[in-house]
Amino acid sequence: MSTLAGLEGAELLDGVRRWLAESGAEPTPARVAQALREQGRVLGDAEVLGAATQLRSELVGSGPLEPLLADPSVTDVLVSAPDRVWVDRGGGLELTPVRFPDAAAVRRLAQRLAAVAGRRLDDARPWADARLPDGTRLHAVLPPVAVGCTCLSLRVVRPRAFTLGELVAAGTVPPGGDRVLRALLDARLSFLVSGGTGSGKTTLLSALLGLVGPDERIVLAEDSAELRPDHPHVVRLETRPANQEGAG
């Protein structure tokens, strides 16, 4: 599908974006074509569809990050500049060819995602830590706290928890480690799961919670709900930020 690229394409999209915002119209192909005609431009069907897809992704999706978030191998998407979009597929950070038009586009996306999650993100409150409706965890920081450009981090939550056996087979848990972990649970001992970002803490803990007996009740208390244990009786609690008066 063709898209509008280059400086001229960016200017056209800005004009279409303003027209849609002022009219309150949805970015359908027909509306995009009408907006282009208002600017004295007539494009082919492929270009109009490309512009509509691009604008709809920006306005109601995750913009240029959508293909990355849809990749089942991606666990984290990080944006530190318009031309610095990174992903983690479990083997360390990789720079992607994905680009934003400018720093303002990164800021717009961060603010829209925060709004979708019901969180405020502006100059008065320049950071947000939230969970999107699909479970994706969002962390965003605006300038000047983030120097130069809005920083955006998205942690993808997969719909199914891994079993301990699957973690052993994948090499996440070393051979024999599963027996130690099962013994900890059987003895009802307290333990701490720690590690760096993306090291598998949540994945491991979800797997361990899935081993808890079905006659037990699990109560989860998290800043952002990420744990998804395969268990019949789970109570999930999530913190909420303080309001403008500082009360929670």
Image (tube, rainbow, N blue to C red):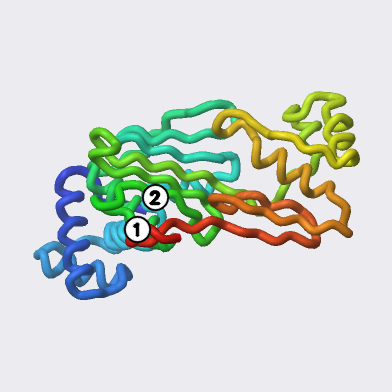
Residue 64, how many percent across, how many down? 37, 48
Instruction: Look at the image and tell me in which quarter the C terminus lies.
Output: bottom left
Labelled pair 1, 2 in contact (Cβ < 8 Å): yes
Nearer to the camera, 150 or 70: 150
Which element is circle 2 on?
strand
Q: On screen, 241 above or below 90? A: below
Residue 151, how many percent across, how many down? 35, 39
Upstream in sequence: badge 1 or badge 2: 1
Which element is circle 1 on?
loop
Nearer to the camera, 105 or 232: 232
Quarter of the rendering containing residue 114: bottom left
Residue 233, how many percent across, how many down? 78, 62
Disc 2 target residue: 128
Nearer to the camera, 66 or 208: 208
Q: Name the amino acid type tagged 1.
A: Arg
Residue at 28% across / 38% down in the picture? Answer: 145
Q: Name the amino acid type tagged 2.
A: Ala
Badge count: 2
Disc 1 target residue: 120
Q: Residues within 10 Å of mark 2 (few under 14, many from 20)?
A: many
Q: Which mark is residue 101?
A: none
Q: Residues within 10 Å of mark 1 (few under 14, many from 20)?
A: many
Q: On screen, 16 above or below 138? A: below
Q: Is residue 225 visible?
A: yes
Q: On screen, 210 above or below 201? A: below
Residue 29, how many percent across, how many down? 31, 68
Q: Is residue 46 visible?
A: no
Residue at 41% across / 46% down in the picture? Answer: 65
